[in-house]
Image (spheres, coloured by chain):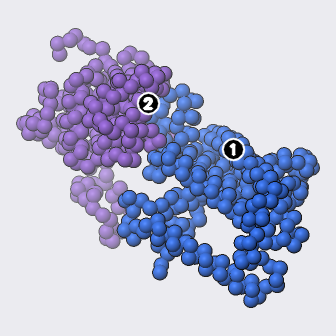
Amino acid sequence: MTESAPEAMIRIDRLTKRYGERAVLQDVSFDVAPGEIVSVVGPSGCGKTTLLRSIAGLAPPSEGSVSIAGREVTEPAEGVAVVFQHFGLFPWKTVFGNVAYGLTVAGMRRKDAEPRVRQLISLVGLEGFEKSYPYQLSGGMQQRAGLARALAIEPRVLVMDEPFASLDAQTRDLLQLELLRIWEQRPTAMVFVTHSIDEAVLMGDRIVILSGRPSHVHDIVDVGIGRPRGREVVDSERFRVVRDYLWTVVMSNGAGQSRPGSADEVTRAGDPPSAESAEGPGPI
Amino acid sequence: MSLPAQPPAAAAAGTAARGLRAARARQPRADGEPQHAHSRGQIMAVRVIAGMVILAIWQFGAMAFAPAYIPRPSRTITQIPGVLSDQQFLSGTASTLLAILEGLLIAVVIGTVIGLIMGRLRDVDRALRLYVNSFYAMPIVALVPLLTVWFGYTPNARLAIIVIEATLPIVFNVAEGARSISGSYEDVARTYRAPWWRVWTGVALPASLPYLLGGLDLAIGRALIGAVVAEFIAGLNGIGYYILFNVRSFHQDDAVVAVCVLIAFALVLRALINLAVRRGLPWYRAA
C-alpha cells in the first residue's frame, strides 16, 4: 500500500439482515477501496444477492450499516449503479433508451445525454443496435447494454449481481475480459458477486468468502495478481493457487452445511432426480 | 383440407391478453414454423370458402324450414344499398359509433388510472377488489333502466352505460398487469433514483400496456352491447334503435344489414388496435 489508509468507498459494518425471524446475513463486515474490485463468493442461497441489495439501498439493513463514501446508505445512493443477473432492461425501451435511462431519470434531456450514450454504446460494442429492442438482442448483447446503462451515470460504485451467470460460457469469457478492459479505462470501486470461483479470481483484487447460515464472512483472500489482467492470468501459478484454495474452502463449507457424509451429494447435486431418491427428503 | 390458419392458441379463450396474442400469432411471421407458413392468399381463400358455406347453410336452411319473412342472404344483400344510403341509418350509426369511441376513450383513461392504483397500492386493492369483481360479474345492462332515470332518455345515458361497461375490464386487466410487474424493473428504476411518479409512468404504465390492450379488446365488445341495449331500452336514435325499429316494422333484412355493420365496426376497431400495437409497440410481441 503506497497510500496511507485510503478512505473506503464502500464500508460494510457488521451488517445483519433478517427476513422475519430468519437471519440471512450475520455481522458481515468488509471495505472496498476506491478503484478496487472485491469479489464475493459463497454457496448458493448464502445471501450474496441480499448483500448487494443492501449496498444498492434496496434492502435496508436490520442491524449494522452500509456506507458509501462515508455516507450511510438508507436509500439508493447517488453514483451507485447495479448490473443485474437478468439484465433488467426495460423491454419497451430501445438500447438507446435503456442506456440513457439513468441520465434521463436524473433530469438530463435526451439530446444532452446523446453523446455520452453513444460513446458508451460503442464502448460496449453495440454500435448499430441503438434502435434495437432488448428482445432483438442475444443475452450477451443485452448484458452489454445493461453494462452501458450502469456506466453511463459515471458511477463511483459498481454493483455486479452475477452479471454473466445467465450467459453461455463463451459469451461469459468474452464479457469478463471486456469488463476488465473497460474497468481499466476508468477504475471504479466494484463489488462483484458470482458463483463462479474462476470469475471471482479473474475479476477481484480481494475475494470475500461467505459461508454458514446465516452467512458471515468466512475469509477474505488477497488475490495478489497485478493489473491490467487478461486471458493469460488464468494460466498463472498464482491464479491456480488462489482458485484451489477457494475451491477447498467453499466445498468444505458447502459439505458442512448438509448432513454428514454429504460430500458425495454435493458432487451429484446436478444429477436429475432418479426414482431411488424418492426414499425420503433428498439433497436440496 | 385442414384449417392451418387457426393454431390451437386461438381456441384457448383464456384472458383477453392471451386472446390478443393468439390473434397476432396468426399473422404470418418471418420466423414462423413451417406448418403455419401459409401465404396470406391461402388463408383468405380458406376464409372466403368458409364464409360462403355459412351463407349457403343459412340461405338453404331458411328456404327449406323457415317462414318467408325470416331474413336470408339473397334478400339481405339486395337491401344493402338502400340501408347504406338511408339518411336515418347513417346519422343513427354515426351517433352510436361516435358514442362508443368516446366512451372507450373515457374508459381507457379512467380504467388505467384506477387499475394502476389498485395494482400498485395493496391496501386500495384489498379494499376495492371484491367490488370491482362483483361489478364485473354482474350484467351491467341491468343498470340501463336506472341510468335512463338518472340521465333521462338522452345520449348521456347511453354514454354512461358504455363507459361503465368498458371501464371494468380495463380496470381488471390493468390492475392484474400492475400487480404482476416484475420486481426487477422496479429495482432498476429505484437504483437510478427514479422519483415515484417516474416509476408509475415509466415502469408501471408501460409494463401494464399489454394487459391494457387485452382489457380494451374485451371493452370493445362490452361497449357495443351497452350502446345497443341502451338504445333498445331508451329508444335513442342510433344503430341499435334502427335495428329494433326495422324488425318491428317487418324490415328484418334491413335490420340484418345493420347488425352486419356493427360486426364490421367491431372487427375494424380491433384490427386498428392490432395495427397500432404492431407499429407503435414492436417490443410487445416479445414481452
The reply, left or right, for residue B89 in relation to residue B127 is right
Badge nearest the viewer, 2 or 1 = 1
What residue sits 26% from the left and 49% below the top?
A: A168
Q: Quadrant of residue A260?
A: bottom left
Q: Quadrant of residue B47?
A: bottom right
Residue lying at the far bottom in this picture: please name it.
B64
Q: Residues within 10 Å of mark 1 (few under 14, many from 20)?
A: some
What residue sits 55% from the left and 53% below the top?
A: B274
Q: How many marks?
A: 2
Nearest the eye: A2 or B114: B114
Nearest the eye: B180 or A105: A105
> Where residue A2 sits in the image (x, y, percent)?
17, 12
Report which residue position mark 2 lands on.
Answer: A101
Q: CA distance from mark 2 to mark 1?
A: 30 Å
Report which residue position mark 1 lands on.
Answer: B105
- Does the CB distance between marks 2 and 1 fall below 8 Å? no
Q: Is residue B47 above or below residue A122?
A: below
Q: Is residue B49 above or below residue B264?
A: below
Q: Is residue A208 above or below residue A135?
A: above
**What shade has chain B been given?**
blue
Provide the letter of the chain coloured purple: A
Label 2 is placed on what type of residue? Tyr
What residue sits 42% from the left and 59% below the top?
A: B29
In this rendering, does residue A102 appear at all?
yes
What residue sits 44% from the left and 30% below the top?
A: A101
In this rendering, does residue B137 appear at all?
no
